[in-house]
Structures are given as structure tokens and as C-alpha cells.
Amino acid sequence: MTKNIKRIVFVINDLKGNGAERVVLTLADQFMEQGHQCHIVCFKPLRELPSRNKLNIHHFKQYYRWIPRSWRGAIVARLLDTFIENNIGTPDLILSNLLPADRVLSHSRLLNVFLIIHNTMSLERFSGAPPQHSKHYTELKKIYTTKPTVCVSKGVMEDFINVFNPHLTTTSIYNPIDATFVRSQSQQSNPITYSNYLVCVAKFNSAKRHDILIQAYAKSGVTLPLVLVGQGPLKEQTMQLVDHLRLSDRVIFSGFHSNPYPIIKNATGLVVSSDYEGLGMVILEAIALGTPVISTDCPSGPNEILPDKNLSPVQDIDALAHNITQLSRNPDAYVIELGSHFSPEFASKRYLDLITH
């Protein structure tokens, strides 16, 4: 290949979801528009998200569940390396995303493999307990100290270093948001018929703390409807809490939307109630759309984006209720500008710097 054109490969389990999966598509679009060859290798042929360009997506089938896990990563890595070289060529840069891909690529023999750390390991993998007490710690330390890593925020990087004390290079590059794409997608029809409402866009899992959000919303006394966008294992439990607090007439479960941007754009405000985030992409998306945002002050992410007045302590129902009330009364006070360091152009340059310096 010519000196300036790079062959870049992303590896991820699938493209079903709106977190790391959206970031992969955003970066792939950006690299392609800069003239680079860009490929995405997925372990599962699942996709729910749109992109600006027709991307080169490859399905690497895994039929190796019968192999003991202690051997599986190394064996599958050899097969994946061969798959990439035969179907794509020799990459200049490989970016591995999320644990299923990291388990394999930590054994790769290809050059310039970086593992992308999307969340605070101490909370996501060890629930805040001492990591060394977990039966998974040895396996995860082996995975995440064999290749250089890129963390999606400074808070994630600090946490990662504290947990694993890696001897290889660790750096932070903010996940980018394609503001132009988000704004264009937001022009589509809004499926929410209310003229004023609050919105939360998050999977129903333990990290997102819908229980805290619902209790804070009830305590705030705000009459604006609360729209919950997403699916997940704790959805039924959240619905039961809504019924228990007699909020069924004001809390709307709208399900998963591959394009949530019209909903976010037309909302009075976005509320994030998470215990932890890697960065908080939905916060950046709301900012790009001019939508006010309030969030819990997670160990990483939101406090690298939002000013103090937009934040409340994690799991503090009273403080979050107060911010919900203030946001509903004066939404304009919670609007902020999107920083240029969250742009795809900035992120793509930082990633290319990994292999040019």
C-alpha cells in the first residue's frame, strides 16, 4: 500500500447495540472518508445501526465452543489472523473492541493490535470489590496486559491502570461522535407524540440504574412524561417499580430504536442515572443535538463532558430529583457546547498516531 493509505481493521462481536458498536461505525466511516482501507470483522452477523458509507464487513464464524476456554483464545487467534490476512491483507492497525474480541486478539501474532477499553473495569467486571479476589482476575489480567490498550476516557484509563498495572503502553482517546450524522438522523419522524418530555436512552441493566431514575423522577414531582428508550434484562423489574409507584400514566417504555436521535432532539432534557459509564456516548449525542443533559457523576465519563451543575452524586435520589426539577423548569441552563476533542477527525488522528510515532 502507499505510504499514507492505511489498512485498518476493527474486530467486534457484532454490530447490535448503540455503545461501542456505534463508535466502531463512526471511526470506520471517518477512516474511509480520509481514503484509508477500513474493514470490520464481526463474530456474529448481527447489525442494527446505520452508517454513512458502505462498509467492508466480514463475518468470522466461530465453531470452537468445544475447545476448553484456556486453549480457545490462542487457537482461534491463529484462525482469525489467517482469516484477516487471506480476506483483507496485512493490516497496519487492528482495534479490538469488547471482551469476546479481546480474548482472541490478545493472542494475535499480527502487528499493531490495540485493545480498546470501553468501561471502568473495577465496576464492570468486579462490581467495585477488590479485583484480586475475583476468580476472573487472573484471566482478565492475562488478556489485558499482553497488548497495548486505548481507554475511551481519562477516568477509564486511571481505573484500568489501578486494576491491572500494565507494563505495556496505555493511553486515552475519547470516543468520537459524528455530530453531522447524528443531526441528519434526528430529522426523521419522532415516534414520541408528546410535545414535552424527559428521556433516558439506556439498556435495562444493573449499571444504568433505572431504579434510581424512577425513584428520583417520582420524588421530583415533575409532570413531564419520562420516556425510556431501550431493552434489557431488567426492563420487567423496572416496569414493576413504575406500577408500584403509580407512575404508569407518565413513564413510557418505548423499546429499542436503531435511530433514537429524533427522540433525543425533541426532548426537554436527557437524564443519565448510571453507576458507571466508560464515557457516555448518549450524553455527547444529546449535546450535539442541543438537548439539555443531566447525569450522575460516575467515576469516569460524564464529569469529563459536563459541568458540575449538570451532575449529581451516584445513587443520590434526592440530588437527582432536584436536578430533574431544575432541568424541567429551566432547560436552557443545562445546554452546553460540544468540544472538538470529541470529533471523529480528532479521534482518527490520535489512532493513526499510535502507529506513526
Image (cartoon, grey):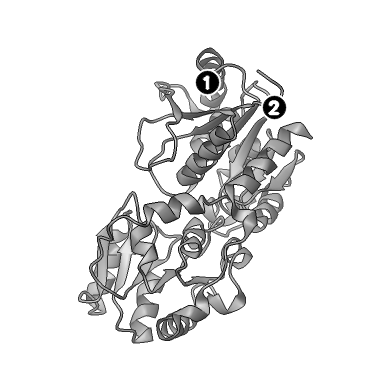
**Amino acid type indicated by mark 2:** Asn
Question: Could you tell me residue 167's position as x and y percent?
Answer: 77, 40
Quadrant of the image containing the C terminus: top right
Residue 339 sits in quarter: bottom right
Name above or below for residue 177 compared with residue 276.
Answer: above
**Can residue 112 be seen by looking at this rendering?**
yes
Name above or below for residue 223 compared with residue 116.
Answer: below
Q: Nearer the viewer, mark 1 or mark 2?
A: 2
Left/right placement of residue 60 relative to residue 300 reads: left
Q: Nearer the viewer, residue 210 or 40?
A: 40
Kindly identify the residue that appears in the image at 61 percent across and 50 percent down.
152
Name above or below for residue 77 compared with residue 231.
Answer: above
Quadrant of the image containing the N terminus: top right
**Can residue 312 be seen by looking at this rendering?**
no
Question: Could you tell me residue 184's position as x and y percent?
Answer: 40, 52
Q: CA distance from mark 1 to mark 2?
A: 26 Å
Task: Answer whether labels 1 and 2 touch (C-beta < 8 Å).
Answer: no
The residue pinned by badge 2 equals: 4
Kindly identify the residue that appears in the image at 25 percent across and 65 percent down.
192
Mark 2 packing: few (<14 Cα in 10 Å), some, or many (20+)? few
Residue, far left: 249
Q: Secondary structure at mark 2?
A: loop
The residue pinned by badge 1 equals: 80
Q: Nearer the viewer, residue 311 or 332?
A: 332
